Amino acid sequence: MKTAVLAYSGGLDTSVCIPLLREQYGFERVVTVTVDVGVPPAEVRRAEARGRKLADRHVTVDARREFARDCCFRLIQANGSYEGYVIGTSIARALIARHVVRVARRMGANALAHGCTGKGNDQLRFEAVFRATGLRVVAPVRELNLVRSEEIAYARKHGIQAGADSRFSVDENLWNRSIEGGELEDPGVEVPEEAYAWTVSPGRAPARPRALDIGFRRGVPVSFATAGRRPLGDGGQPRGRSRPPEALIASLNRIAGAHGVGRSDLMEDRVLGYKARENYEHPAATVLLTAHRDLEGLVLTRHELRIKGLLEPLWAELVYAGLTLDPAYDALNAFIERTQERVTGTVRVRLHRGTCRVVARRSPHGLTSAAGSFETRDPGSLEGLLQLHGLQGRLARRRGG
């Protein structure tokens, strides 16, 4: 049978794609695939119910642990941020697309489909993976140039519940929550508090700070525990109960969000060339990235930090554009993973009314030493260095530079 496999969220755009694939493209069988990367459970249930009703077959893939382990944790190692904010939505798209492809292979499908319009970045991210398969790629909403009012009318004609337009467009996964649309499209409008769900307003956060000890092993967070007032242990080994990746992220989202940590409101340069106002919530990501960067500062050499700092924006741009199949992405990951071999230790952070501040760190691989401390008692050993330090600048001034 002529079969199309559709990346399916259960929303209006992807739901109208099901009858469109039959009527406009002639597919005899439509298979919907929902990939759970930490979306709200109610949304997963809605997608399952609609997929089973509207499509010929529905598949749900639980990829929460895979997303946390292989995407979020790799992002931490790379200090992944795009234009200063935490990458979240984009890094999930390639994983979703790969699972849709796997289902399509099992089903012997002829085509891969998605419900993206022609306006956003997601079409690029899905199709960068889809087109590598050699299968036909179909994007009904974009190709038929449907506007929302036309989609709603078409949905009603086919008995698809369109639902009331929500005030904002929200995309949520385990790592972040993006909020856009509505009045937020105007950069001059302040974001109302009702737009946020994961974080409280910093002004309403508890007056008493909370300190956490975050344990890392090879650049990956493995544990956290409430910190006391005692200094970190001499060994710097991670302390606290080890947690599964997705559980660790979910717990930190709750704790840090309750202290107002992890909001971004910014102007973002999209792949297609225009600017858009974007708002994000990412409490756990803020804590883990803050702690990880600090630990790297303790254990990596100056040159490692400098080179890695030059490469991190390139890594983020590839992820943001969905180009994770590019050989450059693999090469960057190889370098990043090599630098993480010594990034083991514990970092203490203090959460307080929207801020996350590192207050202590310890690692068995820390590069501090007594030889570089204020207790150095051999100033004569520096004489030769001091004679040469700044020599070129002095010569240039003497000779009219």
Image (cartoon, rainbow, N blue to C red):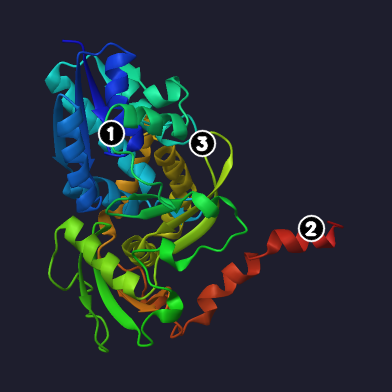
Res 396 label? 2
Element type at marker 2?
A: helix
Give the CA separation, mark 3 to mark 2.
Answer: 45 Å
Residue type at tag 1: Ile
- Identify the residue under disc 1: 160
Q: Residue at x 38, y 87 (%)?
A: 207
Q: Quadrant of residue 26?
A: top left
Give the number of marks.
Answer: 3
Q: Position of residue 327 (x, y in %)?
A: 36, 29
- Identify the residue under disc 3: 271
Q: Is residue 272 above or below residue 217?
A: above
Give the CA separation, mark 3 to mark 1.
Answer: 32 Å
Q: Position of residue 344 (x, y in %)?
A: 25, 63
Q: Are marks 3 and 1 in contact (CB under 8 Å)?
A: no
Q: Who comes first in sequence, dot 2 or dot 1?
A: 1
Q: Residue at x 60, y 55 (%)?
A: 187
Q: Is residue 170 above or below residue 192?
A: above
Which one is in front in this view, the residue at disc 3 or the one at disc 1?
Answer: 1
Residue type at tag 3: Val
Q: Who comes first in sequence, dot 3 or dot 1?
A: 1
Which one is in front in this view, the residue at disc 2 or the one at disc 1?
Answer: 1
